[in-house]
Amino acid sequence: MSLFLLLRSQCPPNLLSTEHNYKTRLCIPCAWLAMRNRLSTGDRMQSWNNGSVVKCMFCSTPVETRDHLFFSCSYATEVWTATARNVFQARFSTDWPTIVNYISGTSADCVQSFLERYTFQATIHMLWKERNARRHGEVPNTTTSLINWIDKQVRNQFAVIRITGDGRYDKGLQAWFASRN
Ligand SMILES: [Zn+2]
């Protein structure tokens, strides 16, 4: 099953029409595109147009690639590590193929699996958004800002799930809080 379908399958169906869920679902195509290496990263733009700016907008590495952005780049490493290290614990990695291989597998713990996949897609979305903002000349945000926004997004997602009375996800929120320490 693709990650896109895995992420979709983790969404309780009764949440799909809520406004918040609509917004967070916008993250999914970003992770899905990254999985398929279809985001317009520097290396891909270079093959389309030699005049494109292809450097990394975070660290100025000459050619931005998917695997660099997620999450080898020093800026991305900082955001991903602060967000996901305690979620993934022994499985934590900044190496794209390693993470994708793990996250695409099956897991007996659906709540833990949801938390891992949600932090993965939220981090990709936030990094990609920040990268695009910088390309458009906007004021750069610090890693601390991104880390805080991802934290808020994860909390909001669990809060919405809680409203529906799905108690399984209380465990997920508790795991998220525990991982913040
Ligand atoms: Zn970089």
Image (cartoon, grey):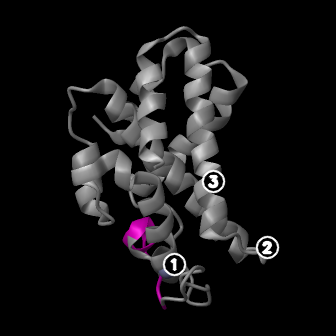
Q: Is mark 1 within 8 Å of ligand 1?
A: no
Q: Secondary structure at mark 3?
A: helix
Vertical placement of residue 178 versus 128, above or below: above
Q: Nearer the viewer, mark 2 or mark 3?
A: 3
Nearest the eye: 177 or 134 = 177
Q: Secondary structure at mark 1?
A: helix
Circles 3 and 1: CB distance less than 8 Å? no
Q: Quadrant of residue 162?
A: top right
> Quick one: label 3, few (<14), some, or many (20+) residues within 10 Å?
some
**Apparent side of residue 133 relative to residue 90 in the rendered image (left or right):** right
Q: Is residue 149 visible?
A: yes
Q: Where is residue 113 drawn, in percent x and y?
A: 32, 34
Residue 166 among those drawn in magenta: no
Three-letter amino acid code of the residue under disc 1: Gly
Residue marked by disc 3: 148
Q: Residue at x 35, y 40 (%)?
A: 3
Q: Secondary structure at mark 2?
A: loop
Dot 2 or dot 3, earlier in sequence:
2
Q: Quadrant of residue 4?
A: top left
Kindly report the secondary structure that dominates the magenta region of the rendered protein.
helix
**What residue range appears in magenta?**
62-71
Residue 65 among those drawn in magenta: yes
**Apparent side of residue 97 relative to residue 128 in the rendered image (left or right):** left
Please tell me the numbered disc located at residue 42. Answer: 1
Three-letter amino acid code of the residue under disc 2: Glu
Please tell me the numbered disc located at residue 138. Answer: 2
Three-letter amino acid code of the residue under disc 3: Asn
Vertical placement of residue 128 versus 51, above or below: above
Distance from Cα at disc 2 to Cα at disc 1:
18 Å
